[in-house]
Image (spheres, grey):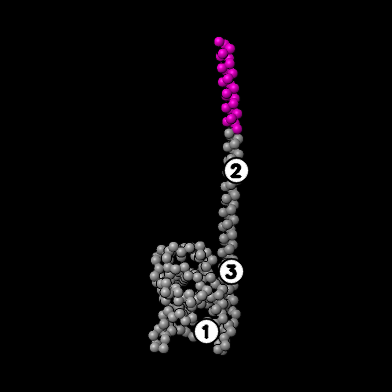
Amino acid sequence: MANSREKKTRNVFTEKAALEQEIAALQAKLEEQAAKLADCRREIEDAIVARIKQRDELDALREENRQLRRRLALYEPPADPAGVHAGDEPPAQDEPPANAAGVPVEDSPAEPARTREEQEFFDSFRIYVVGGTEKWQKKAAEVFPTMHFLGSEKNFDRSALAQADYVIINTNAVSHACTEKAKNAAPKSASIIMTSNNNLHLLQRKLLETIQ
């Protein structure tokens, strides 16, 4: 009977020792996994910080590039065969152009006359357009072939505005949601121009005023 109790006691101690070893192994494994998790968290945090720094640097470079382009557009003399010299102010145009009958042309597809300085402006900057009717956007695309048109619906790809220098929002035929999405998606360095006028000549003047 005593031998049976002793054997049972030995079995209990043996089982206890085995369980303690298993617990120690599990604790060691848990500490190892916790260390790996901490390393992963640090790597993620470092990656986030690096991405923020890169974005800030990119924004700074983009702004510097915009300023340099503006200075170039301001100070490089245009070649004007008509005899207009650099620094001369273009004639004021308070009224929209009119046709032969004297009727104002609000959205004529004929491209406004441009100096070389003005043409370089449109060639150099990334200009995106949101809003306006489909007919107006089509005519505007003929006049300003270097612009990018995103339509008038709020389902446009917001990433398209990531590199924008200018964002034009034509409030004709555009929803409030689309307008707000365009404003929020534009980078901080971009200039946002709101317009409700379909006159493309006035739109060109409004854009060129930003480099004065």
Query: Where the N terminus falls, by quadrant?
Result: top right
| Residue drawn at (54%, 85%) of the image | 88
Q: Which tag, 1 or 2, sits closer to the chain's start?
A: 2
In this rendered view, identify the residue nearer to me: 59 or 129.
Answer: 129
Residue 206 visible in rendering: no
Identify the residue under disc 1: 89
Q: Residue at x 58, y 16 (%)?
A: 7
Which SS class for mark 3? helix
Left or right placement of residue 118 versus residue 93 in this view: right
Classify residue 193 as left or right of residue 72: left
Q: Which residue is mark 2?
A: 36
User: Please, what is the three-letter code of the amino acid marked with disc 1?
Assistant: Glu
**Residue 77 placement (x, y as % from top left):** 59, 82
Whole-percent x and y of residue 177?
A: 41, 63
In the image, residue 12 lies in the stretch drawn in magenta: yes
The answer to which of marks 2 and 3 sits earlier in the sequence is: 2
Label 3 Cα crowd, 10 Å radius (few <14 / some 14-19 / many 20+): few
Specify which label sits upstream in the sequence, 3 or 1.
3
Relative to 189, does residue 96 appear above or below in the rendering?
Answer: below
50, 109: nearer the viewer: 109
Q: Disc 3 marks which residue?
A: 64
Q: Is residue 4 above or below residue 124?
A: above
Residue count near mark 1 (Cα–Cα under 10 Å), binned few <14, some 14–19, many ≥20 = few
> Which portion, as a residue range, is magenta?
1-25
Is residue 119 at all visible to an observer of this figure? yes
Residue shown at the point (59%, 62%) measured from the top left: 57
The secondary structure type at the circle numbered 1 is loop
